[in-house]
Each structure stands twice: as C-alpha cells, then as structure tokens.
Amino acid sequence: MAAEMQNRATRFQEEYYNLRAADAAVGDFRECRGSVGALTRTQQRDYAFKEELSFMQGGMKDNVHAESLVPPIEERIANPIFPWPSVAVLSVHAATVVGCCKDVGATLVICQWVFDDEANHLLMHRNLPAVRWVGGVELELIAIATGGRIVPRFQELTPEKLGKAGMVREKSFGTTKERMLYIEHCANSKAVTIFICGGNKMMIEETKRSIHDALCVARNLIRNNSIVYGGGAAEIACSLAVDAAADKYPGVEQYAIRAFAEALDSVPMALAENSGLQPIETLSVVKSQQLKENIPFYGIDCNDVGTNDMREQNVFETLIGKQQQILLATLVVKMILKIDDVISSSEY
C-alpha cells in the first residue's frame, strides 16, 4: 500500500508542475473534494474516480458505477505524503528546471506566475537572476521588445527562443524607495518609456497631459509638415480674410459670416487675457498691424518679448491641428443651432 501511494504521489507531482502547461489534449480540470484530475480526449486521469464526475443539486454523483481509488481515511491519515509529493521530489524537480534554464544560456528568467522560494534560491545559487511575478501584458511587451518567445514549459526552452537586451538594471525612486526594473537597449524596440516624477498626483497628471499634447504635435508634423504661426496670428489673419469676404454675400448670410469672423477673434483675446494683458486693446493693436503691413505673422506677445512677430519668437502650430480645432468648433455650433426648443421637466 505504501508503494502504491508513493507512485500516486509521484504521478500527482508530475501533473502538479505541468498543470498550467498541459498539452492540447487536455480538455478541462475538475476538482472534487481535494483531488485534482485532468480529463483528456483519449484518456481520463483522475485521482479519485475512474469515470467522469457530475455535480447535481449540490451533491456529487458518478455517471457510472465507478470504483473508488481513494484509500480509507485511516490510511490517508497514517501516511501524510498522500497525495502531495515529498519535499525531496520537489527539490529535485526545481533543480532540473534551473539547470535547464542555465544550460540554454539564459542570463535572466522572467515568469508570469510566481515560483516558490526553493526555485528562487537555486536560481541565485547558479548566478541566474529572476523576476518571479510579471503581469501578462508586461510579459508580452518584453517578449516583443527583446525578440524572445514565451514558453509554457521549461522543456521547450531552446537558445533560439531567448530574447536579447543590452542592459537590465533595478533602480529605486521616491521617498518610499520603490523599485523598478529597467530593460534597456532591446533588440526589436524603437519605443521609449517616459518616467514622470512629481510632488503630488495632480502635478504628475498635468505633466502627463502636457507630454501627450507634445507627442500629438510631433505626430501631426510627421503626417503633414505644414505650419501656421501661433500666438493667435492665424486666427487674426483668418478673421480679417473672412470679414473682407462678407461684403461679397448679400442678405442675411453676410451677418452670419461676420459673426464667424468675430468668433475667430475670441482665441487671441483669450490669449491676451490669460497673459495679463488688456484683451480688447491688445487685439486691436495686432489687427491694425496686420492690416497696415499686410503681414499675417503678428500675434499676441504672451511672453512679453517686445515684438509681436511670431517668426522671431519661433511660435508656430501645425496646420492640421489648427484645421481640426476650427472644424470641430464649427460642428459643435452647428449642432447647437439645430436644437429648436428645450422642454423643461417642470412643463410636464
């Protein structure tokens, strides 16, 4: 009986380590009061019963008259190794796994699911650093960046499936000394990670928004490298052009066109007001400069440089971004104008 129970424990140990990496023949896993079994297409392995089990009305019922393989409770209490494998067997298996990783030439092991302290000790003893808990998304990104392959079983490790990185280092930051792992100089990655630190969460979020805006500007320049000068210069030039074209349209349309030109002036007025300047006076001065000199590069001197020429201040915006701003604002106004009436809830 002891030999039979030891064989069962060894068989359970094999399934215990290969449970997550079971082959394609495995259909599902069932749990019945402490014993784990794997149902396959060709054969069924169960440590409690020979046939499949079904659960009905809260109770356990076998489909056929199955012969129980579980020893009586007295024998299980007398032999504490059932059904778990011995510590010696686990240590030998962990040493085999570590040796396999070392033999293929790996210098760093990254695992999605945590491995035990015994394996971690053996890895450090073999001078093989390891990260034993990495999220699934992060693990996939690391595999893409380094050119490695994610393997479900250690027996599938080969030198061709290893990824490559120039440097892997750990760095602590912040007052809490939190640690972060840096994987740099990867083989197949042209992306970079921007690490943001700040005194509080609001500062970090504001910095993230600013970086996002800057990245969007760079993306727009790559798509279309045409630019317009900022500081409200483009809006003032468009306002003057639209106002001049309004005289060509008779009837009520002329008033709508002039209203659109006046709406364009709200952008440079807001810039002047946010800069601590007199909005109406500053806008009138800049508009007169554009009309007299016929130069559409004059805008609001927000930084108090001393000149309104945006070319000298190197202030510009992407053309595609400016077009999208005016287009979206126009669509919102048209959507609001389509509303004929607003019915209040108090009228019901």
Image (spheres, rainbow, N blue to C red):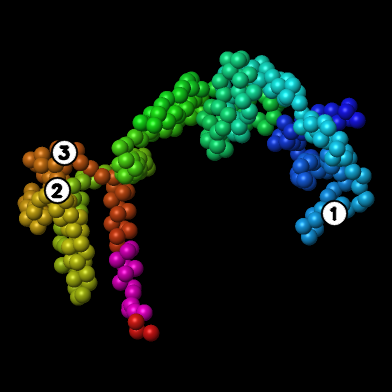
The residue drawn where x is 70% and y is 36% is: 20
Task: Tell me if residue 341 is in the magenta stretch.
Answer: yes
Identity of the residue drawn at 14% across and 42% down: 303
88 relative to 249 in the view: left or right:
right
Badge 3: residue crowd in 10 Å (few <14, some 14–19, many ≥20): some
Q: Is residue 219 above or below residue 262?
A: above
CA neighbours of label 2 inside 10 A, class few (<14), some (14 to 19), many (20+): some
Residue 143: % across, % down: 56, 31
Q: Are marks 2 and 1 in contact (CB under 8 Å)?
A: no
Q: Which residue is mark 1?
A: 61
Mark-to-mark CA distance, 3 and 1: 83 Å
Q: Quadrant of residue 194?
A: top left
Closest to the camera, between mark 3 and mark 1, is 1
Q: Earlier in the sequence, mark 2 or mark 1?
A: 1
55 on left or right of 51: left
**Does any portion of residue 344 appear in the rendered image?**
yes
Q: On residue 134, which mark appears?
A: none
- The part of the image, by quadrant, that contains residue 113 is top right
The local secondary structure at tag 2 comes to loop
What amino acid is found at the position of numbered circle 1 in the picture? Lys
The magenta stretch is 331-345
| Residue 14 belongs to magenta span | no
SS category of the residue bearing label 1: strand
Which quadrant is the N terminus positioned in?
A: top right
Q: Nearer the viewer, residue 147 or 77?
A: 77
Secondary structure of the residue carrying numbered label 3: helix
